[in-house]
Image: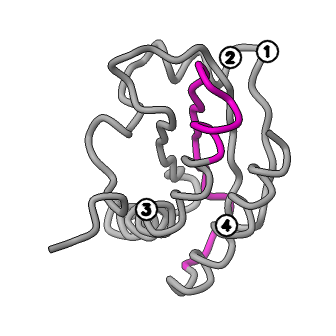
Amino acid sequence: MADARATLGRRERIKSRKQVEALFEGGNSRSMAAFPLRVVYMLTEATAEEPPVQMMVSVSKRHFKHAVQRNRVKRQVREAYRLNKQPLHDHIVSKQPGKALWLAFIWQADKLFATNDVTTNMQRLLQRLIEQL
């Protein structure tokens, strides 16, 4: 049986247009990068029904013309996040009670990377994010 903490459920994804617009158009969001990933993040007030951390992944058609390649990159980013999200989740719950964190991971490279490289960059990015919060 898989560890319940190492899942990435439907509720942990940003799907609402309002959330996406608030994240990218609001003046409250910040960003940082660990090539080939960039994360745009925003602390908001938590609601009872939402998890403390929600995320989304964006890969531009400008970088990869074929959907197969875009989907591969999105799978790699989601998997890297799923495996390394727990310290960030614990930090938000313990150090920022009543707050929720929205994350948008944006792929910035024009080439594919090995899954290990994506995971390493995700770990670096999440660690820097914890230090910033």
Judged by depth in the image, the label closer to the viewer, 3 or 4, is: 3
Q: Give the vertical position of 20 relative to 129 (above or below).
A: above
Q: Secondary structure at mark 3?
A: helix
Judged by depth in the image, the label closer to the viewer, 4 or 2, is: 2
Amino acid type for the residue under numbered disc 1: Gly
Picture disc at residue 82: 3
- The quarter of the displayed image where residue 24 is located: top right
Q: Is residue 74 magenta?
A: no
Which class describes the residues within 10 Å of circle 2: few (<14), some (14-19), or many (20+)? Answer: few
Q: Is residue 92 magenta?
A: yes
Residue 105, percent across and down?
A: 59, 49
Residue 33, percent across and down?
A: 79, 56
Amino acid type for the residue under numbered disc 3: Arg
Who comes first in sequence, dot 2 or dot 3? 2
> Which region of the structure is painted magenta?
91-112
Who comes first in sequence, dot 3 or dot 1? 1
C-alpha gap between disc 2 and disc 3 = 26 Å
Q: Nearer the viewer, residue 46 or 34?
A: 46
C-alpha gap between disc 4 and disc 2 = 23 Å
Q: Secondary structure at mark 2?
A: helix
Q: Which residue is mark 4?
A: 109
**Would residue 103 appear left or right of 65 to someone viewing this image?**
right
